Amino acid sequence: MGNRIELFNLEKHFAFYGAYHSNPTNIVIHMLFVWPIFFTAVLLLDFTPSLFNLPHIDFSLFGVHVSLIFNFGFLFAFVYAVFYMCLDVKAGTLAALLCGVCWIVSSVLATRLGFSLAWKVVLAVQLFCWIGQFIGHGVFEKRAPALLDNLVQAFIMAPFFVLFEALQTFLGYEPYPGFHAIVQAKIETEINEWKEKKQNLLN
């Protein structure tokens, strides 16, 4: 039971990720680049075969035949969507809708591009976005990315974190009163501990 609670502990997840993304410029960079990384990952997985021989959903969009296949692209987006809704109903539902849109739009794009061109697009976007994020950490945050300390948590939380950060910044959203203050205190504590540990290593 305790492990399950920790898995869906929004304060803990947000504080962990936020401690690595406190610089405003680095946050903006991640807002711009994280969802394209997610989208292109789904796009590449759209070329995998159907899972369990589930039926396709076929339709035409702007004259382009599209076939939605319940493959690893769908599974990838679905797992993320469910996890986000378990973290927070309101923001999580919006994130889940974005995951669904990514799957549908990527399926359209996969049909349009074909694998021979799609993988090149995916590679270019992934390289550009990852380089941008590493610049954000190295130049502005001056701290290594979260993925170097917790790969799974960083990859899973990144799309939700940047969306949540946008909702919080522009709309003042909080899952419950006092959430931002609680998490900000945890972030500052973690950053201070990191700075102290870094200083001790230099001495």
Image (tube, rainbow, N blue to C red):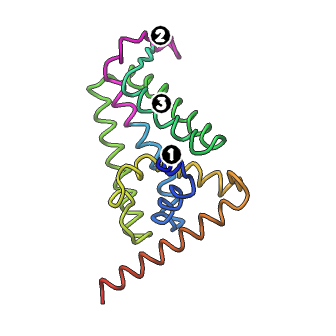
* Quarter of the figure with the C terminus: bottom left
Mark linked to residue 78: 3
Tell me what residue is drawn at x 36 percent, y 66 percent: 144
Q: Is residue 99 magenta?
A: no
Q: Are marks 3 and 1 in contact (CB under 8 Å)?
A: no
Indicate which label's residue lies in the foreground, 2 or 3.
3
Tell me what residue is drawn at x 61 percent, y 38 percent: 94
> x, y percentage for residue 185?
59, 70
Q: Earlier in the sequence, mark 1 or mark 2?
A: 1
174 relative to 107 in the view: left or right: right
* C-alpha gap between disc 3 and disc 1: 24 Å
> x, y percentage for residue 54?
41, 12
* The magenta segment: 41-65
The residue that disc 2 covers is 58
Q: Is residue 44 magenta?
A: yes
Residue type pointed to by label 3: Phe
103 relative to 118 in the view: left or right: right
Residue type pointed to by label 1: Met
Q: Earlier in the sequence, mark 2 or mark 3?
A: 2
Residue type pointed to by label 2: Asp
Tell me what residue is drawn at x 57 percent, y 40 percent: 86
Mark linked to residue 91: none
Indicate which label's residue lies in the foreground, 1 or 2.
1
Mark linked to residue 1: 1
Mark 2, Cα crowd under 10 Å, few <14 / some 14-19 / many 20+, is few
Tell me what residue is drawn at x 48 percent, y 12 percent: 57
Q: Earlier in the sequence, mark 3 or mark 1?
A: 1
